[in-house]
Amino acid sequence: MSGPAPASAGEGPLAGRVALVTGAGRGIGRAVAVALARAGAHVVALSRTQGALEETDDLIRAATGRSATLLVLDLREGEAIDLIGPNLAARFGRLDVVVGAAALLGRLGPLTHLPDHEWKDLWAVNVTANWRLMRTTEPLLRASDAGRAVFLTDSVAGAPRAYWGPYGASKAALEHLVRAWAAEVAITPLKVNLVDPGPVATRLRAAAFPGEDAGRLPKPEDVAPAIVSLCLPAETRSGQVIALSPVARAAA
């Protein structure tokens, strides 16, 4: 991890709290990281690209005057994920928020044509990495008086679609894991939810719909506040899939 420990808490509903965001190098993950910092949290921003994380840190500094902690990590490296919880415990002594925004789209096409290595990468990032993230951060999240975990999903998880099989299956698996985890921690203060942001102008969306006019779509910054609201101590829902674009999810 790079970057100093928080010297002082920010102001806002998450002041004094520590938030970990995966996929924080771009897109929705980056926008959520900045919004969490604006809400007062010290952000631990995770991505596999140092340069992208530094750009996120620049945005956080510009917005708040405070820096983030940068964690360069490839989510396919499972054993490295296992060290996140212990490292955060040693460095900060706490973790209050986890947002799992990282995802791979993979190759869209006949599911029987997908090469083994692409299947393994898709499952490693979209499913296994999030399971490891839950496992390594649960002790800290349960120790918080208002632990919150939010994972991004997609409408295709509940609506199988030709040529989207591997990606859709990975998101369906993620939804099942997250909702099962929510049931397991139901008697604790920890609240665990999923967010389906709907169509958003991200690189993943552009890869899936290359002919689409991205200018007509919401930007990551438009959906970030709704995701951050699920990370606040005041949030009482758990085990839910919150669709930010209910019409799009219903039509999927």
Image (cartoon, helix red, strand yellow):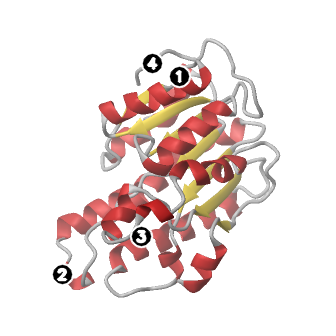
As drawn, the label of residue 113 is 2
Q: Tell me, yes or no, whether the two marked residues, 4 and 2, touch with CB atoms within 8 Å.
A: no
Judging by the rendered image, the residue that carries numbered circle 1 is 61
Q: Relative to the observer, which residue lies in front, 237 or 173?
A: 237
Separation of disc 2 and disc 3 at Cα?
A: 17 Å
Q: Which amino acid does the dot numbered 2 rest on?
A: His
Sequence-wise, the earlier of marks 3 and 1 is 1
Please provide percent x and percent y for residue 147. Answer: 70, 42
Residue at numbered disc 3: 170
At label 3, counting other C-alpha atoms closer than 10 Å, the crowd grade (few under 14, some 14-19, many 20 or more) is many
Q: CA distance from mark 4 to mark 1?
A: 12 Å
- Compute the Cα span from label 2 to label 1: 45 Å
* Image quarter of the N terminus: top left
Picture disc at residue 3: 4
Label 4 environment density (alpha carbons within 10 Å; few <14, some 14–19, many ≥20) = few
The label nearer to you, 4 versus 1, is: 1
